[in-house]
Amino acid sequence: MAIQLGDIAPDFTADTTEGTISFHDWKGISWAVLFSHPKDFTPVCTTELGYTARLAEDFAQRNVKVIGLSCDSVQDHLAWSQDIEDTQGIRPNFPMIADPNRTVANLYDMIHPNASDTMTVRSVFVIAPDNTVKLTITYPASTGRNFDEVLRVIDSLQLTATKKVATPVNWKQGDDVIILPALSNEEAAELFPNGWDEQKPYLRVVSQ
Ligand code: BEZ
């Protein structure tokens, strides 16, 4: 069965470009982004991995570790890293899992046989410090992902993990947020003493 939100991210041990990794040990109590790409030495993937490498500081600020995966070998990953540096100006600065036997890909349902028998789709899993899965995204091979959107969702996940709010459409860090409908007005008044904009009883907007 596919991995669902709230599930514990399956643990695994795998070879990577940074040595053998036991996923839960490597991740520790950080957040993690585990993402798959269809194949090494392919154009869209080349741009995605270069861009993700450029976001290293943004991920670090959010206490997020990043790890990639494809069903290619460590040797291919390393050779391709040079191409990524040549074309994107930066090499991957995060481990890339080599999964030639598709062990991890199968564990995380990253192969969708009706799309391709052999290549992983573009999966993204955002995993919280307690190892629960907080976000899953699946893109087809033909469409590169938006890693700024991954950061935006992480900002929302990290905010809503500790505050009794949700984030509205197209929200970004610093924008107004919405008080959780489960909170009564009396409870909300304690948490938000400066008040809120009550547009409907269930739509109470408050500054972040
Ligand atoms: C790409 O990364 O460019 C790609 C990979 C697999 C199929 C199509 C495109």
Image: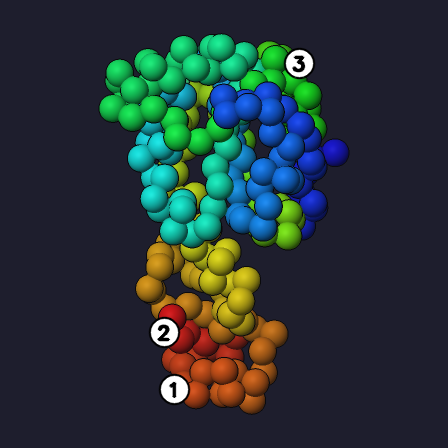
User: Which of 109 and 181 lies nearest the eye of the viewer?
Assistant: 109
- Between marks 1 and 3, how big is the CA–CA gap? 57 Å
Quick check: 29 above or below 99?
A: below
Report whether the residue tagged 1 is closer than 8 Å to ligand 1. Answer: no
- Identified by mark 1, the residue type is Asn
- Between marks 1 and 2, how big is the CA–CA gap? 9 Å
Kindly identify which residue carries mark 1. Answer: 194
Q: Point out residue 157 in the picture as x, y percentages from the top left corner.
A: 50, 56
SS at circle 3: loop
Report whether the residue tagged 2 is closer than 8 Å to ligand 1. Answer: no
Q: Residue furthest front?
A: 19
Q: Which label's residue is closer to the chain start, 1 or 2?
A: 1
Kindly identify which residue carries mark 2. Answer: 207
Side of 131 where 200 appears, left or right: left
Q: Which mark is residue 101?
A: 3
Report whether the residue tagged 3 is closer than 8 Å to ligand 1. Answer: no
User: Which of 112 and 120 lies nearest the eye of the viewer?
Assistant: 120
SS at circle 1: loop
Side of 176 where 99 appears, left or right: right
- Between marks 3 and 2, how big is the CA–CA gap? 49 Å
Q: Residue at x 48, y 41 (%)?
A: 65
Side of 158 where 115 appears, left or right: right
Find out whether the residues at labels 1 and 2 contact each other: C-beta distance under 8 Å. yes
Q: Which mark is residue 164?
A: none
- Identified by mark 3, the residue type is Asn
Quadrant of the rendering where the C terminus is positioned? bottom left
Q: Nearer the viewer, mark 3 or mark 2?
A: 3
Q: Nearer the viewer, mark 1 or mark 3?
A: 3
Find out whether the residues at labels 3 and 2 contact each other: C-beta distance under 8 Å. no
Q: Which label's residue is closer to the chain start, 1 or 3?
A: 3
Q: Residue at x 49, y 58 (%)?
A: 158
- Identified by mark 2, the residue type is Ser
